[in-house]
Image: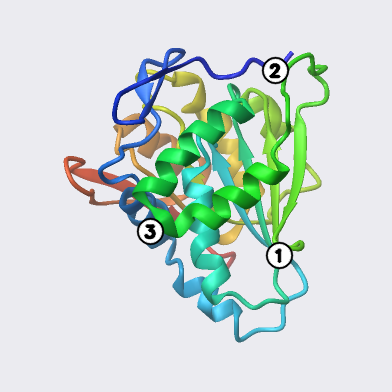
Amino acid sequence: MITTAKITWLESGEPYSEQFQDFYFSTDGGFAEAEYVFLKQNNFPQRFCELAHQQINTPFQILETGFGTGLNFLVTVFHWLQVANLNCTLKYTSVEKFPLAKHQLEQVYSTFSHNWPQLSFICAELLQHYPQTLSNVDSINTTYMIDLFDGKIQLILLFDDAQIALDKLLPEQAATIDACYLDGFAPAKNPQMWHNDLFNIISTLCKPGAGISTFTSAGFVRRGLITAGFELSKVPGLGKKREILRGTKPLIP
C-alpha cells in the first residue's frame, strides 16, 4: 500500500514532515534554492535554450530522487516552457516513498501561488491531473504517468522506495537520463535515500555527459557518487548552505 505523507503545517504555510522531522522547503528562498542547486548546476535553462535550436525526436529526461511537494519540478517546467523547442518533450521521472495526497498538495500550492505567483499556472495544471486518491492502491501499482501541457511535459511519479523503484527502470532506461536531481531529505534524517547501491543504479541510468546535483556536501555522498562513476566537485551553496555538490558522468572516450 502507498503511505502518504504525514505533515504538520506551520503558520507560515510551510509543511513539516513528521516522518523525517524536516522541512520540505523554505518559504523565504525555496524557489531560488531550487533554481540554484538543481537548475544552475545542471546548466539550465541554457541547455534548454540549446534544444530549441535542434531537431530532437527523443525526450529530454530528468531523474529526481524525492518529489516531495514537486517544487523542483515546477521550477524546471517554468523555465522549460519559456525556452525549449515545442517539438521536444520533457520527461521528468521522480521517486517518492511518502507522496502528498491531493488535498495536501492543494494546500502547499496555495502557499506557492502566494509566494511565487509565476508558478500558479503550472500548479493548477498539475493539480488537474494529479491522482484524486492514493489510498487503497495495490503496492504493485505505484507508477503514475501524467501528461501536462498537451504532452509537452511527461511526469512519471514512482511512489515507492527509491532503490526498488529505480531498479525497476533497468535495463530499459539504462543510459537515457540527461540530468539527475538528488533531493531526498537530509542524509542524517533519510539515510535510505543516500547509499552506494542507489548511487550505482542512478549512474547506470545516466547517459555519458549527464549532470547531477544535490544540496548536500556530505563526504560519504561525494565519495559514493565518485565510486559510482561521477566526476564531482564542491561549489558554494546558497544562503546558510556553505557548499553543495555538482558533477557529471564522464563522456565515453
Residue at the image position 69 percent from the left and 25 percent from the top: 164
Three-letter amino acid code at disc 3? Gln
**Between residues 115 and 170, which one lies in front from this camera angle?**
115
Residue at the image position 54 percent from the left and 80 percent from the top: 50
Residue 18 in percent (x, y) is at 43, 13
Q: Quadrant of residue 80?
A: bottom right
Distance between mark 3 and mark 2 Cα atoms: 32 Å
Please identify the quadrant where the N terminus is shown. Answer: top right
Residue at the image position 58 percent from the left and 21 percent from the top: 98
The residue identified by callout 3 is 41
The mark nearer the N terminus, 1 or 3, is 3
Distance between mark 1 and mark 3 Cα atoms: 23 Å
Local secondary structure at mark 3: helix
Distance between mark 1 and mark 2 Cα atoms: 28 Å
Local secondary structure at mark 1: loop
Three-letter amino acid code at disc 2? Ile
The residue identified by callout 1 is 152
